[in-house]
Image (spheres, rainbow, N blue to C red):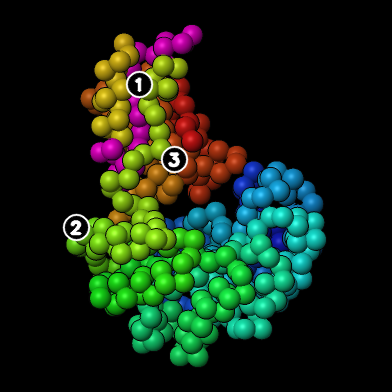
Amino acid sequence: MNLTTPVSFFHSESMRCIGKNVMPLSTVCNAKCIFCSNKMNPFKIHRCGFRPYREVVEHLYHYMNLISSYDEIRLSDTMPGTLSEGEATLHPQFFKICKLIRKHRPTNPLHITTNGALLTEEFISKMAKLRPFHLCISYHSTNVDHWCKIYGMNEKQFETATNAWKLCKDAGLSLSGAVVALPSVVGYEDLKKTLLWMNSFSPYGLFLWEPGYSKMASKEMLEIMKVDHEEFKAFVYEMYKACDNVGITWEKDPDLPLDIQPQFYMADTLKENIYRKVMWLTAEASYDRLVELVAHANQHVANEHYVQKVVNHTYGGNINCNGLLMIDDMRKAVFEGRDVFEPDLVITSNAMLDAYGNDMTGAHYTDVTHIPMWWRN
């Protein structure tokens, strides 16, 4: 089977996500976002149109038994860097698909991320009949000119997306919001106004994204994405307080504690196969925090632990999270780290791996090094 065809490529994405509640319906989008990562990806992004209905049926019957009866079924998300993220509500059989899922999975919340441009009152009333249904509305400015510039859409679409917030709330649909912060385009006052306006609808959460760009970004793109990190951090902390009834999530917050307890891994390194020198790999975003955690835990074990920073050479730019590292980046980091520390074990995050242990380029985790490796969640 040719894996470049729309049907089979959607299918292969589902296979990569086995064990995850992801079934993207569309790679078609009705917006032309000025920050779109597709323009800056270092390798090919697949655009496969709409997921065929028959493939939804296959996915539903074969893979949905891998999730519980209460996990969200996400109809927008994709494995990053492979399929183009599309607008699920554009799918010509959107409601037919949702009704099929609801018939066989009556308790699972359906989840979509949407720009809201198609969320008319009629559309929302149909969604309300399929509850539980969660919408994450990406909404980057309450200013019509700014919104239209960011999305490449018109004023009518802005009005639809804006009105959708109240309509969704009144219809009993679960809401959250997402904002890509572009202070160089809209200014901080506009950004603050937008977040406070979204907060007034008491959504389940607000997700604030600092703009990310790769080494492929044009000069024009870099101007759009330009952010002073310290200034942005001060703004986010102000908004944490202003929106404390809902809660803002800024995943790149350098003060957020890491969800890892190194002491448990360290204890395991001294069982059966005793490892004397252990290298921890992590991306730049979490490096300082992991160094602190490992140094503290290392005081209580007999072996030696060292944290090696992994620079994202694949994407470059300001991309510095574990989830977008490639096997090649990790291989280079191990090679560089061995100049100062010769490990007999490497421990690192598995955030960049799919269900088969491959990164987005298809490289397998066994290609990093001949040294034994542990992959942590």
Can residue 275 be found in the magenta stretch? yes
Task: Nearest to the eye among marks 3 and 1: give it.
Answer: 1
The residue where tag 1 is placed is 278
Residue at 37 percent across and 22 percent down: it is 263
**Is 165 situated left or right of 59 in this image?**
left
Task: Nearest to the eye among marks 3 and 2: give it.
Answer: 2
The residue where tag 2 is placed is 230
Amino acid tagged 3:
Ile
Q: Residues within 10 Å of mark 2 (few under 14, many from 20)?
A: few
- Of residues 160 and 340, the one nearer the viewer is 160
Label 3 and label 2: CA atoms lie apart by: 31 Å
Amino acid tagged 1:
Val
Residue at 65 percent across and 58 percent down: it is 109
Count the labels in the image: 3
Which numbered disc flags the more N-terminal residue, 3 or 1? 1
Residue at 77 percent across and 48 percent down: it is 62
Mark 1 secondary-structure assignment: strand
Identify whether 39 is placed above or below 337.
below
Would you say the residues marked 3 and 1 are in contact, meaning their CB atoms lie under 8 Å apart?
A: no
Identify whether 135 is placed above or below 186.
above
The residue where tag 3 is placed is 327
Q: Residues within 10 Å of mark 3 (few under 14, many from 20)?
A: many
Q: Start and end of the magenta stretch?
A: 269-289
Label 3 and label 1: CA atoms lie apart by: 19 Å
**Is 316 situated left or right of 103 in this image?**
left
Label 1 and label 2: CA atoms lie apart by: 33 Å
Question: In the rendering, at what x and y percent does residue 125 appear?
Answer: 67, 78
Mark 2 secondary-structure assignment: helix
